[in-house]
Image (cartoon, grey):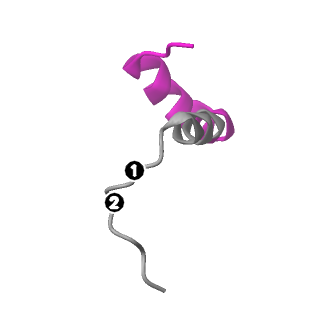
């Protein structure tokens, strides 16, 4: 699925729930960054 910046901007302004869903889907598709610093609690 490909969405250009214009569509993303429109969704962010006019349909926040759909935009948030797309962001969650994109984040889930990213590989784990093994070089990222570990979060400390």
Which percent across, then down, holds residue 18? 66, 33
Q: Whole-percent x and y of residue 41?
A: 48, 86
Say which residue appears at 44% left-offset and 28% top-offset. Answer: 9
Residue closer to the observer: 27 or 35:
35
Vertical placement of residue 22 versus 28, above or below = above
Which secondary structure class fits the magenta region best? helix
Q: Is residue 3 magenta?
A: yes
Q: Quadrant of residue 40?
A: bottom left
Residue shown at the point (47%, 40%) measured from the top left: 31
Query: Residue, x 56% and y 34% (percent of image)?
Result: 29
For label 1, the residue is 33
* Image quadrant containing the N terminus: top right
Q: Which residue is mark 2?
A: 36
| Magenta stretch in the rendered image | 1-20
Q: Secondary structure at mark 2?
A: loop
Left or right? Give the position of 18 relative to 38. right
Considering only vertical position in the picture, is 5 above or below 27?
above
What is the secondary structure assignment of the residue under circle 1? loop
Labelled pair 1, 2 in contact (Cβ < 8 Å)? yes
Residue 33 vertical position relative to residue 24 in the rendered view, above or below: below
Dot 2 crowding, Cα within 10 Å, few <14, some 14–19, many 20+: few
- Quadrant for residue 22, please give it: top right
- Foreground pick, 21 / 34: 34
Tally the numbered discs. Answer: 2
- Indicate left or right for 3 with 21 as reference: left
- In terms of depth relative to the viewer, which is nearer, 30 or 7? 30
* Coordinates of residue 30 in the picture (x, y in percent): 49, 37
Apparent side of residue 1 relative to residue 5 in the rendered image (left or right): right
Q: Residues within 10 Å of mark 1 (few under 14, many from 20)?
A: few
Task: Please tell me which residue lies in front, 13 or 32.
Answer: 32
In whole angstroms, how far apart are the C-alphas of marks 1 and 2?
Answer: 6 Å
């Amino acid at each position: 699925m490909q969405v250009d910046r214009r569509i993303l901007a429109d969704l962010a302004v006019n349909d926040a729930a759909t935009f948030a869903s797309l962001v969650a889907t994109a984040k889930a598709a990213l590989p784990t960054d093994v070089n990222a610093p570990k979060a400390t609690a």
